[in-house]
Structures are given as structure tokens and as C-alpha cells.
Amino acid sequence: MSQNIKILPGATVCEDCTLEGDITIGGGTVIHPRVTIIAEGGPIIISEYCIIEEYATIIHKKAETQETPPKPLFIGAHNVFEVACKLESFFGHIGESNVFECRSFVGSDVKIGSGCVIGAACQLTVPQTLADNTVIWGSEHHNREALEKQPTQLLQLDFLSKVMPNYHRLRKPNIHKRLPSRPSQDTAK
Amino acid sequence: MAYLTQPDYVKYICSCGQLKPITNLYFCRHCLKIRCGFCICHEVDSHYCANCLENMPSSEARLKKNRCSSCFACPSCFHTLSTRATLARDPAGGDGKPPKKMYYLSCFNCRWTSRDVGIPDQPVASGGWPERTNPFTTRFNQLLDYYKAIAQQEKQEKLDKERKKFVTRGKYINLTDKTGLTGAMARNIAGLPSSESSSSVISNFVPSQASPDVEELPDDYHLKEIDLKQITRISQRTSCPELQPSLASRLSPRPRALCVKRSQRCRACDHNLTKPEYNPGSVKFKIELLAYYHVPEVKIISYETIKPGGTSALLLKLSNPTAHEMTVKMLQPEDVPDQEDEHKTIEKTLEKSLNLEKDISWNASFPRRPPPPNAGSVNLPAVSLTLAQRDDAAEYDDEPPGDNDDIILWRKSNKLALRLKLTTDAQAKVGSNAYFSFALQYSYRNTVPPSATVVQHSDHTLYTTLILDLGKVCE
């Protein structure tokens, strides 16, 4: 697999993680150690201000009907992937301000809007579409609709990007020219 | 830990006939019997909130409807709500004032917030949350007053009747007859509430009336598509019985229900079996008569598969939890001598405790010890085994392996492993549960100081019957 990892300035990416394929990591994003991101079905683009915690796994699966050129998996801004969550997707787009709680699993046929919360240990395996602000929790997968998006983790991000360099080896940003910021919809298409 | 996470493979038969694992059993040192939660008296010791650990007397708890005044439960998932702070900017502001801290309630489990249902943020961290008033409060109070009045009236009538029984109109002229002082006036002088007021409550009470006119359902009732996210689940409605919100937007934080600390009492001798410490933060007990500390514990190490008509080996571990040496002998459950004196002692103490109505009729009407289910029999050694006392320091000693023979596999401080043979019935059905039972005869030294009146032997021979669950009968 071709290694093509682009880290934008301002991103904090620990060295001790598995990144494979064509991956772009936006500024302000923090990736903890032991994270696995595999782009086998196409490029993965992670936007600004995401937190990806330890043992989180993001895989862009190969679809059966592979398009050429392959569709990128676009992960919006302010998403939080908590410890040991797993995301397998070949849909091109994941919205903003979602929270994937600890040990949650999102299968490949799930479309996720914005402001959704997938509760701890919840497993979404059936093809479905989560509308904006859906909250799923508990062993019975109760769901409800939140009124507003989950609050942003900017304070936490600030803290992490300050502390992380003191204790971990980091990957250096390799793109020094800031890309012109585009609205997320454009990249999805 | 195994007792918490695994099924109960070894069960003891309680003196009431229930099957329970040793961790769910109590041991009454005064009756020298195993008791379980089913056959003892549970008493509420104190009320407390499990979240803020505030203690309150039961009268206050009743007044607050058994709910904490400062903690809230999530109306959506019943988890405890947490208070979160945000910095609110003055909408009219801009005059350099520092942003004010505002608080709202939020659930960390389902992410429900008090903002979801439009409850405004509060300037103080605790208290001041708006309460939704019950639309039927007045009717509720009316009913309460009415039933109180009826109860009072009935009490009065009963009293009057009793008085009439004793007062015999005879030679003597009653004071009321002489002076014309009526009962109502006498009550008035004595400062008692007049019976008039209670009767007025009763006479003014309007019973509810059923009406044949029912509001019609909207036309689109059956056609309208239901959005499950907008309506509440049954558990959410019943958690708030006075309002029963049907829409998710009408949910409101519920004051958290209180917990109780219970003490357990033996029903036969009225002695305490457990008594928790009063402080809600403490998980210790002042009295803790658990079977786990007094009855020899049996654990299954391993066993061979159970086949109909075959014999299989069974390895058991016995341990002595007491601080005294214990002699253990294994018996067939049929060989346990009957201890029928129990009924008498129960009835005797019954007479003693007059105010406590104890129904022990079930004791007599049901067979006390149903024959344990059996898939075969355990071939038991006819020897008495001695178990050393529990010694917490023993595990640090390097002990030479104890005596080994064909029954005892190994011996280690207060523990003993046994090798036994099981004989399965030839008729045992394949796939049925393989239960095996045996009884233990064990010596027990009672450390309770004997009471002045009763001469008590401190050494006893006690019996307990156990049932082992060895999976299924295989082919």
C-alpha cells in the first residue's frame, strides 16, 4: 500500500500509531498513540480539531464496487473518537461534532450526520442513516434526538496539544503551505 | 469475585428450604441455623441519597416523598444528572463585564440536558430548578383531607363504642345528663378539634363523576406518522406518575429517589443478623453474621463428564472460615437427623414479641426440606476430616504439603481438596441437569457468651445440605 500521509501544521500526531494509505490530517487535530487509521479503499481526510484517542481504529474499507478514482472518506471537524472505538466505512462523509464513545463500533453501511453520539459499547452493524443530533446509548441501543450539537472540546484540544509533545514523539507536519479551506461538502463530492 | 460473575454451581439448602449460594446466606449464631433473605426480617435502618450521601431521618424522608432535595435523575435514562457550568455572555452586554457563570443539568449517559426541554440555565449551582406543578394538586389534597377525615371519624366511632361498653348507665347520674354539656362542647373546652370540621370535609366532598363525553381523537390519529424520538417510552412515563409526559419535550428532571440501609433480623430469635453502620459513606457492618464466615465453604475444582450409569471423579475444595478447628464429615442427605424442635422455638418467641405479627403458617404447611434433585449419588468417605482454623498469616508460611491419601488430594492451612467418586443413575436422561447432593456434618464452636439463664454448650454439631450443579448429563 502506498504511504502518503499528509499532516497539516497545527496537528499533533503521535509517532506510535499505524497510519496506512493516503491520509490527510487537518490542523488542530490530536491523534493519540496506538491509533490505527487504514485507508485501503481510498483516501481518508480528517478535518480540523478532531480528537482520536488511544486504540481507536478508523478503516476506509474497500467497497465491492470500487470506483475509480476511489472516493475519499471525509471526516468532519470537531469529531471525538474515544478509546478503542472502531469505525469502518466506505461512505464518503461523516459530519461534524460527532462523538464515538469508548468501544463503540460503527459498521461499514452506516451514514452519520452531524452532532451524533454513539454511546459506549454500542454496535451499529445494520445499514442505516443517523440523522443529525442522534444520540444512541445503552445496551438496548436507545436513541433520542438532542436539541443541539455536542459542545466542542476546544479546551481539551488546547491542553492535549500542549501536553502531548512533552511525553510522546510526534510526527512532524509535512505540508507547510496551508491549503485554502474549503467547505466540507465540496470535498465529499 | 467468582460468586458475582459466574453462575452458582454450589448451592446450600437454607433452613427454610430455599437454595442459595453461600454468599447469599446468613448464619444465626443464636439458633445455629442458616437463614436466607427469604426467611428473615428486613428492617429499614436509615434513608440516604446514594449520590450526595446525605442522611435523613425517615420522617423527613416521608415528607420529601423519599426523594433527595439536591440531586436529580435523568428523565430519559434515569442516570444521575450532573451540573455543568458554562460562561454565558450578556446578550445586551459588551460593557466589559466578565461573562457570568451559568449552570445547567446534563446526563453523562444519554447526553440529555436541561436545555433540551427549554429549562433556562440557573445562576446558582444547586437548587432553584423550576418544578413542574401537578395539575391535580387541589384534587389530590381534597382526597387526602377526605380520607384523613374518614379515618379520624372511624377512630372516634371505635373509641365511642369501646367507652359505651364500659360505661354502664346505672345509679349514678352522668355529668352530661346533669349539666346538659354536650360532647361537642366538652371537646371544645378541651381544645380538641371539633368533630364538626371533619364532618364538614366529608359532607363537602364531591366524588368524581364519570362522564360519557369523551374528547374525540383527531382525524389524522391513525394516519399521522409517529416520530419515535418525539414521544416517550413507557418507563419514562411511569418514572413520573403524576405527570406522565407523553412527549419527549415535556420531560423534566426528577429528584433522585433515596436508598435505604437495611438491617436483618432472625425471625425465630429476633437477634440481628446484619446491622450496617449508620454513616451512608461506610460499607461496613456493625453486626455481620454471614454464612460465609461460619459455614464450611465448598467449591468445585473439576469433575469428569457425567454419563448415565457411569462413575466419574469429582474434586472438591473445602475450607474452614472460622477461627477454630473444624471436624467435617460427609453424609448422604437422607442421613441428616431431623431437628423438629425448631417449630416450638419459633412459636415461643412469637408469644414474646406481641406487636410483631409473624406468619409462620407457611412453615408448617410446606415440606421443610424437599428431597434434593439427584442425578445419582456421591460415594462419600466414612471418615471425619479435620480442617485447621483460618490463619491469615498462613499463606506467607512455606508449608510442607500435607498428608495425601486416596481421598485427600492436598491440604493447605484451612483448605482441603477431596477426591470423590460420583455414581450416576442408569436412568438419568441425557441432557438433563446433573445435580448431586450431599450433606456436611461439621463441628462449630460458638463464641457467643452464653446467657445467664440458659446453659449453653459452646461446641455444636451442625448439618448443612448442598447441591452441586455439574452441568448436563452427557452421552
Image (tube, grey):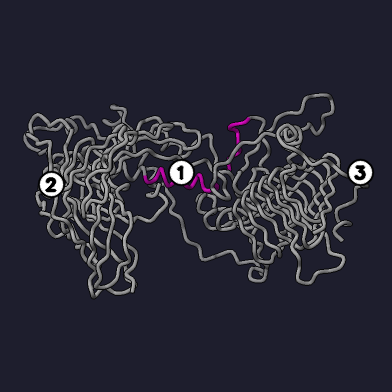
Residue depicted at 81% across the width and 48% down the height? A25
Could you tell me how far apart the alpha carbons at marks 2 and 3 are, in whole angstroms?
89 Å
The residue beneath circle 1 is: B141
Judging from the image, what secondary structure is the residue with disc 3 in?
Answer: loop
Residue B315 x, y percent position in the rendering? 28, 56
Marks 2/3 in contact by CB < 8 Å: the verdict is no
Which callout, 2 or 1, points at the residue further toward the start of the chain? Answer: 1
Q: Position of residue B235 (x, y in %)?
A: 52, 55
**Label 2: chain letter:** B
Secondary structure category for the residue under label 2: helix
**What residue span does the magenta drawing correspond to?**
B125-147
Q: Please name whichever residue, B313 or B83, is drawn nearer the observer in this view of the structure.
A: B313
Q: Name the quadrant of the C terminus of chain B.
A: bottom left
Q: Which residue is drawn at 47% across and 42% down?
A: B257
What residue lies at 24% left-to-right and 69% top-to-bottom? Answer: B424
Query: Label 1 is found on which chain of the structure?
Result: B
* Image quadrant where residue B304 sits: bottom left
Residue B449 shown left or right of residue B155 in the figure = left
Percent across and percent down for residue A62 are 76, 65
**Residue position marked by numbered label 3 in the rendering:** A178
Mark 2 residue crowding within 10 angstroms, few (<14) / some (14–19) / many (20+): some
- Kind of residue indicated by mark 1: Asn
Dot 1: element: helix
The subunit letter for the residue under badge 3 reads: A
Question: Which residue is nearer to you in this view: B252 or B469?
Answer: B469
